[in-house]
Image: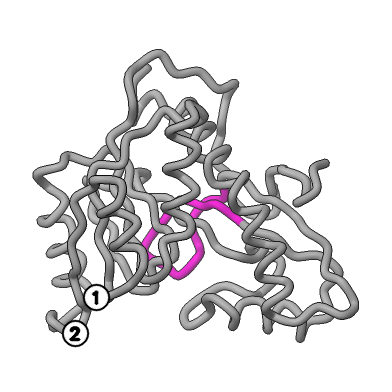
Amino acid sequence: MTETGELFELPARPMLELSEPRLDRGPINCAVLLSGSGRTLENLLVVITGGGLNCAIRAVISSKPDVRGLQVAADAGIPAFVVQRQSFASDQEYSAAIYEELRPFDPELILLCGFLRKLVVPAAFEGRILNIHPALLPESAAGGKGLYGDRVHAAVLASNATRSGATVHVVDNGYDTGPVVLRATVPVLPDDTPASLASRVFEAECALYPAAIRRYVATRGDLFGG
């Protein structure tokens, strides 16, 4: 147990069969998709720079212009692009445009870091996209379409839950329905507001996402070699 919560797996829905972690190869080429402040991207870059994550973030795409996440990418020297949903007639066309933008960077793994748009997963990227959700899935019932940011934490508080946390899962074509990789728990305190709970959950996310990425990449030799 750490100050931010316990890392553990959830067997309550189909889980990935993960063996003991190992990885004997160079950095995994990654792309990050975001829609806001870039705090999760920032945290991943700190962990990567410190040698705690065998990844290289080659490109960043934002669904919104003029967000801090684009500046975080620029400060790190990472190519960054804006692809807005309203420019496309469907989720399929929007997603195809994102993959086309990423194609020159040849990402092996796409990391959703507060990305607030529907991403359709083609066969070529099945198992190659991870998301972090700021609640415990599926037990919290605080996942799905329209549940993001403070809406998630408000839903947790409204449920009178005594714990919350974060979940890293593989992205499929549902909303927050893909197989769980790893979760972290935090307590829900009697005087919590959505903002205070969000702060506690984000602290847990900072340790959880790198740990989940390490474990997933190291145990999926069929996708990443090693």
Badge 2 marks a residue whose secondary structure is helix
Q: Which residue occupies the foreground of this view, 97 or 187?
A: 187
For residue 65, which numbered disc appears in the image? 1
Question: Which kind of residue does numbered mark 2 sit on?
Answer: Gln
- Residue at the location (70% across, 54% down)? 12
Q: Which residue occupies the foreground of this view, 188 or 14?
A: 188
Give the class, few, some or many, for how many residues have Cα within 10 Å of label 1's Cα (few <14, many ≥20).
some
Read off the magenta span. 167-180
Question: Which kind of residue does numbered mark 1 sit on?
Answer: Pro
117 vs 28: above or below:
below
Q: In x, y percent, where is residue 26?
A: 32, 19
- Residue at the location (60% across, 53% down)? 205
The answer to whether 173 appears left or right of 157 in the picture is left
Which mark is in front, 2 or 1? 1
Label 2, label 1: how many angstroms apart (C-alpha)?
Answer: 12 Å
179 vs 161: above or below:
above
122 vs 18: above or below:
below
Residue 113 in which image quadrant = bottom left
Q: In x, y percent, where is residue 62?
A: 27, 66
Residue position marked by numbered label 2 in the rendering: 86
Q: In x, y percent, where is residue 220?
A: 43, 29
